[in-house]
Image (spheres, grey):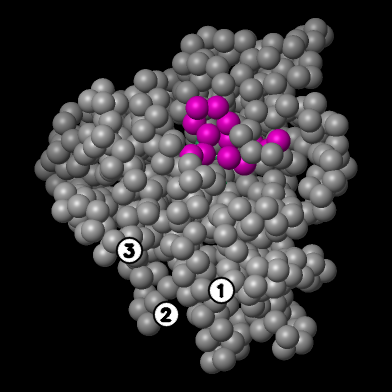
Amino acid sequence: MSPHMENLAKPLALSLGSYALWRLVRPHVSPDEITKVPGPGGNFAFAGHMQDMFGGEHAWKFHERLLTEYGGVAKIHGVLNEPQLYVSDPVALHHIITKDTFDEDSVLLSFVPNVWGPSFSGVSGDHHKKQRKMLSPVFSIQQMRGLVPVFYPIANELRNVFADEIKTGRGVVDVFDWMSLTALEYIGRGGLGHSFDALNTRKVNEYNEYIKTAVSTMTVLYPLITLMPYIGHLGPAWFRRKVVDWTPINAVHRLRDISDVMQATSEAIYHKKKSALEEGEEALTGLVANGKDIMTTLLKANSKADEADRLPENELLAQMNALIFAGQDTTSNAMSHALHSLAMNQGVQDRLRKEVLQAKEDNGGQELGYDALIALPYLDAIFRETLRMYPPSAIVWRQSVKDTVLPLSRPMKLAGSKEEITGLPVKKGTRVIISIMNANRDKRVWGEDAFEWKPDRWLKPLPETVTKAKMPGIYSSMMTFLGGNRSCIGMKFAELEMKMLLFVLIENFVFSVEEGTEITWTFQVLQQPGIIGPDGKVDPRSQLPLKISFVGDGKP
Ligand code: HEM
């Protein structure tokens, strides 16, 4: 251990030890109402229910149990015995995401600025409002229409990659890997006006190799990350950086390196873009996306904005990191689920193909424009159903910023009480987990078939229970893109990207699961696909091998 580390180790260990002890005994010394909320038991001492929540293939059952046994609000335990609420009740969700009594979790508010700079998830209150004010208009439908010519070439490049795979290989591709690379290229060209050259089959994409391990690295470090509200603001930035360098934990260094690579890349793109903007409009036409990307529009709007609304350079850079982080894994995950579901449901796939081929024919064989593509009814139903059933961010955290009473749609009895309550007192600082997935799969809302992937449900009016539930999500009665002032800003971007990719891929290829291959999804912070080996265990490597053949070559 270095001398610096030795000096730091004792006080740090003492503080962490005292904090851990306090967390363990606090629920007994100063219990609040939420400790009486019904919830699953278990051994809470260190990691609480974290292992149950993110424990791979078994975690699905845990989340389902929280819904079926405990309804819309349950108590679970976080790291060091911290009681937390696990919520899918629509009325409670409405309160959490629309009232000013809850905000981003303090862990993220201290972690994000240290790792990616002061972007959305790392700022709160008026600061967050200011960022949204500047960025929301940049994601307008007008902007999306302008992105169509930037997006089609990416889908066509992926089509060519898959075509080569059929001609030269076994015709089995790891769809998960390709979706990750494709989503990086979409957010690169459409979001930042930069190509990561991610669909180049001749070389490994180094940038992607770094960022694709970000979520798993953070999962490993999760217990340490929960300490960020206490240690994330200690001393100046250079000191915190030194502490990271001295910490003898590989995953900490890995996260530092990922953050460094992202920051350096964003800075390089930013400076190139800035000088092109200074040169004038003509210089932009020579760049990737011809200046039609989100970042160029943002930089232009920012330079014209009033002084009070303008974002400083470090925040613009942080937004670039945030866009990559928020826009890549989410869309690639949803696309992988969509293609897997289509491979498992050949009838649905055939029907989608009919719609796609007809639409192309009706358009004189030309690629569809934004409005025609977005409006295709069966493609839309598949998009909605995939996002309802498999929301990429299945859960997100919030924290109360003041004492409040959480309204409930169904009365609940607290432990030791015979009385039913319709409002749950919640103390300042309480963490709640918004279960996007359970809100989207509640049988009382969506019907008995809520756990089934059925695109057809979107082709007829939704059950009255869905409309009556008034889910506070911004999209289609579901919580997938959240709601309120922290809802997903990139929803339209994701919709265009996913619908276009599905259109081009289903027009050209038939997807299926090879006989003898059993695919399963594990529940981690993001869900990961994998194959089940002959021993019945899930192979630890994330992969989604699907067989592809050309349309017209006969069914596989
Ligand atoms: C299927 C794809 C996507 C899904 C399901 C999704 C879902 C979400 C969710 C649930 C949140 C709230 C997270 C939280 O508060 O903890 C969020 C926020 C956000 N998303 Fe997305 N997202 C998707 C794609 C995208 C894309 C493509 C972009 C960018 C181009 C993007 C940019 C953002 C940003 C910047 C935020 C933070 C907003 C804020 O805090 O004010 N997302 N997204």
Q: Is mark 2 within 8 Å of ligand 1?
A: no
The percent coordinates of residue 241 (x first, y second) are: 19, 42
Task: Tell me which amino acid carries mark 1.
Answer: Asp
Task: Tell me which amino acid carries mark 3.
Answer: Val
Indicate whether residue 487 is drawn in magenta: yes
Which SS class for mark 2?
A: loop
- Give the camera-side residue of 374 and 55: 374
The residue tagged 1 is 174
- Give the camera-side residue of 336 and 70: 336
The residue tagged 3 is 288
- The extreme left residue here reads 3
Q: Main secondary structure of the magenta part?
A: loop
Task: Tell me which amino acid carries mark 2.
Answer: Thr
Q: Residue 297, located in which quarter of the rendered image? A: top left
Indicate whether residue 135 is drawn in magenta: no
In the image, what residue occupies the spot 64% across and 25% down? 93
The percent coordinates of residue 504 (x first, y second) are: 60, 70
* 494 is higher (above) or lower (below) than 138: below
Q: In the displayed structure, does residue 273 sit left or right of residue 524? A: left
